[in-house]
Amino acid sequence: MSGGVIKKYATKTLVKVRFDDTVKWYECSVPAFVGDNATAEVDGVEKTGKVEEVLLQVTADKSPVPFPLLKEVIRVFEDEM
């Protein structure tokens, strides 16, 4: 038997963010938790919304949105009380 390389699929962390009237999925390279605030681009404008869901180690075949269509979250932060 010959040895081979097992393919490692690219994985991403995805966050589902609710803005006033819109819910969108984004790629997130920083730690994020449900309930955090996230700033991202929506229709060419930066908006801040609430993180509703976080998916870790998502592969392209299991993603709710095709990887090429994902945009990156600009900033994630907790509520300041």
Image: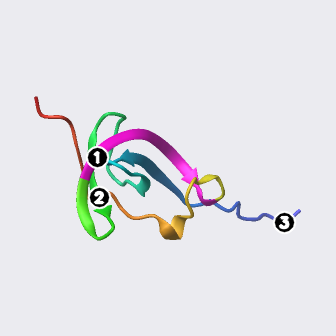
Q: Which of 39 and 28 is in front in this view?
A: 39
Quadrant position of the N terminus in the picture: bottom right
Q: Is label 2 in contact with label 1 (beta carbons under 8 Å)?
A: yes
Image quadrant assignment for residue 7: bottom right
Q: How crowded is mark 3: few (under 14 residues within 10 Å), some or many (20 or more)?
A: few
Give the mark nearest the N terminus, 1 or 3: 3
Q: Residue 72 carries which label?
A: none
Which residue in the structure is indicated by mark 1? 49
Q: Is residue 6 left or right of residue 79?
A: right
**Label 2: which secondary element:** strand
| Mark 1 or 3, closer to the camera | 1
Looking at the image, is mark 3 or mark 2 nearer the viewer?
A: 2
Distance between mark 2 and mark 1 Cα atoms: 8 Å
For mark 2, what is the residue? Answer: 40
What residue is disc 3 on? 2
Residue extending farthest to the right is 1
* Label 3: element kind: loop
